[in-house]
Amino acid sequence: MNDSEYGFLFKPNGNEEQGPSNSGEEIFSDDTIAQALARELGQNSLDAIAKDDAWPVTMVFELHRMKVEDIPDVNNLRRHLRAALGRYPDSPRLQEAVKTLDGECIDVLRVGDYGTKGLSGSESIADSGSVLTALTRGSGVSVGKTDAGGSFGIGKSVGILSSLVRTEFWTTRTPDSDETVFAGCTQLTTHQVPGSDDPRQLLGPMGTYTLLSDMQDYRYLRDPAPLGPFSQRTEPGTDVYIIGYSAAGDDPRLEQIRDAMIDNFMAAIMRGHLVVDGVTDKGRGWHLDSGSLKRVIDSIPDPERRTVMQAFHNALLQPPVVRNDSRLGEMKLYINIDDSLPRKLNTIVMRKPLMKVRAYTNTSITAKYAAVLECSSPQGNRILRGMEPVRHDDWQAARDKQNGKAVLRSIKKFILEELRKRVRRELGDEITIKGLNTLLPSELQIDGNPDRHGVRASNGPGSERESASLQGRETTPEPVANTGGKSVNITLTKPAVTDEDGSPASTGR
């Protein structure tokens, strides 16, 4: 797809110099590319549902190789990239970008959503409330997303950071329109006008794909031809095209994207709010919906990741504990107590978009469990959203002076109290016998560690006799009464081991 009237427009830089680094890098520095894309684009799609409760929203992640020459305005993009590299010749990222555009083919990731309302508004400078402008030219803008998940400008940033050539395109269509809008953006550096010898002729870092003959306003292309091997947008929704998807080599089947969607949106998928497909050059690779989710989780080859996902999936299948809070409204807590888990998995918390925000740890709970807290009431969702940073990965009391501390206190108290009740009901109280390990024979070890006294019993075929490390043949189980969760101090009245002459050992036992 190429139209000579449209291309990347860079405007004079003004007084600010921007180098190869991008502020968005710090925002997503702790995330993998797959995690950042899944969270940001997933919440944007869920927020854009066409009508309230008209679920599901469908997302398609589609990865294809396409010819570099099929990139719109690619020759002009090359010129500006080389100019940026000329100003910052030591930048590995710019070097990689120029090299990528000099190749024959490039990996492009399309992320499309359906059952959504597309990007409303126009691209005009005069339309200050335009969602289309917020995404394509905004930075950290949240137009029309007061109670929703994320910021359109942040979603744009993660796409740019995932592109080897710092470029992405969009196609979008609204339900009340019969035309599709095509937009594009590239985020480079402050650079000299290509071909100019005047170092004072500097252009800003952002290039916007628009009608080049209109220097007074922005005018995006309508009803474009298909981009490379991808299909045209003919129904409401939005497509994001990441040019030179940087994780394509490490994740050719988009399985990292799949796992990130499960990790962050498991509840939304389970409830039928979200359906996700993965498509590559080899065809449709995977499908996530409420019916297939468990099967997909059970087939994940990484045992650690599989076990964690299964634990939280099982938690969401449990009847929730419900509590009404004066500020947050209804809260629900789903608890899965499972002693077979490799460790304690803590409590994931989320609000109305049903996206994982973070996990809370309760150090006083020693049982192994996975739990999920949900607050989806309108008032609770509004308060909690206001307590989130731009990454939406925490609830910070300092962001809400009026409610913050009280809200977090209520949430943590609810989680702790209900976890204690459930552990006591399912496992009983624990008894800690202080100093017991010092009284066991020192030559016996736990897990092969000579510094830890005591022994762990192991199962075997058994006999009528028992040893210190092998339990005997099972007989009829005998009930054991639990006396309560108290620590018990013990006193040694008879030595555990005697000397060879039969006299009591004086020390060490």
Image (cartoon, rainbow, N blue to C red):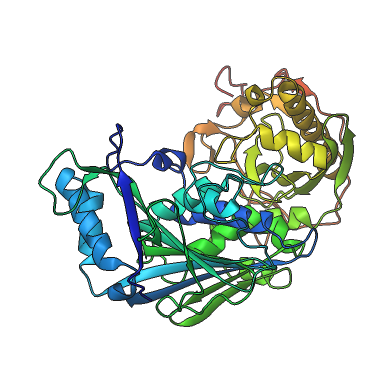
Which of 324 and 237 lies nearest the eye of the viewer? 237
* Residue beneath the point at 21% across and 59% down: 79
Compared with residue 55, is residue 66 higher up or lower down, i.e. above or below?
below
Q: Quadrant of the C terminus?
A: top right
**Number of numbered discs present?**
0
Q: Residue furthest left?
A: 197
Compared with residue 435, is residue 353 higher up or lower down, i.e. above or below?
below
Q: Quadrant of residue 95?
A: bottom left
Q: Is residue 497 visible?
A: no
* Residue beneath the point at 22% across and 45% down: 191
Tell me if 197 is positioned left or right of 355 in this view. left
Compared with residue 401, is residue 225 higher up or lower down, i.e. above or below?
below
Question: Where residue 468 appears, x then y in whole percent?
Answer: 63, 44
Which of 328 and 348 lies nearest the eye of the viewer? 328
Question: Where residue 58 appears, x then y in whole percent?
Answer: 65, 68
* Residue beneath the point at 72% across and 63% down: 50
Which of 38 and 160 lies nearest the eye of the viewer? 160
